[in-house]
Amino acid sequence: MLLAVLVAVFAVVGSALEQSHEPPAQVGTAVVSAAAGESLHDLAARTAPAERVSDSVAVIRRLNHLDGVQVAPASVALLVPVYHG
């Protein structure tokens, strides 16, 4: 019985923590060059290391009208989000 209660409490708390994630405040954009073989995930991690990579990738895709997550050709200039903080 106690185990069931603990599992229920952890499920509720975990769900509340995940739902409370708010995207960071984007304050502008910057132009960066992608390196050869660099994916949008790599670019997002490099340019906004403190932010959730999936959020930054979504913004980069939207800013640059991209369909996929690969950057081609190398050294292409891309807009990336700049976050407050």
Image (cartoon, grey):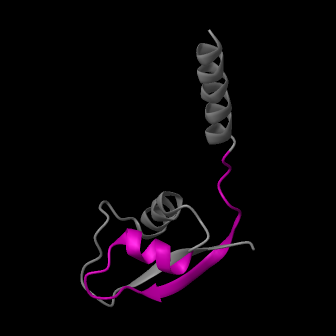
| Residue 42 is a magenta residue | yes
- In the rendered image, the quadrant that contains the C terminus is bottom right
Point out residue 52 in the picture as x, y percentages from the top left corner. Answer: 55, 61
Residue for point 59% across, 22% down:
7
Point out residue 14 in the picture as x, y percentages from the top left corner. Answer: 62, 35
Which corner quadrant of the image does residue 48 belong to?
bottom right
Q: Nearer the viewer, residue 4 or 76?
A: 4
Horizontal side of 13 relative to 66 (left or right) equals: right
- In the rendered image, the quadrant that contains the N terminus is top right
Above or below, 72 against 18 in this view is: below
Above or below, 71 against 36 in this view is: above
Above or below, 74 against 12 in this view is: below
Question: Which residues are drawn in magenta?
Answer: 21-48
Which corner quadrant of the image does residue 34 belong to?
bottom left
Above or below, 52 against 38 in this view is: above
Q: Nearer the viewer, residue 52 or 8?
A: 8
Residue for point 33% across, 88% down:
35
Which corner quadrant of the image does residue 28 belong to?
bottom right
Q: Residue furthest front?
A: 2
Q: Nearer the viewer, residue 20 or 32?
A: 20
Point out residue 62 in the picture as x, y percentages from the top left corner. Answer: 46, 61
Point out residue 11 in the picture as x, y percentages from the top left corner. Answer: 60, 27
Q: Nearer the viewer, residue 32 or 37?
A: 37
Residue for point 71% across, 63% down:
25
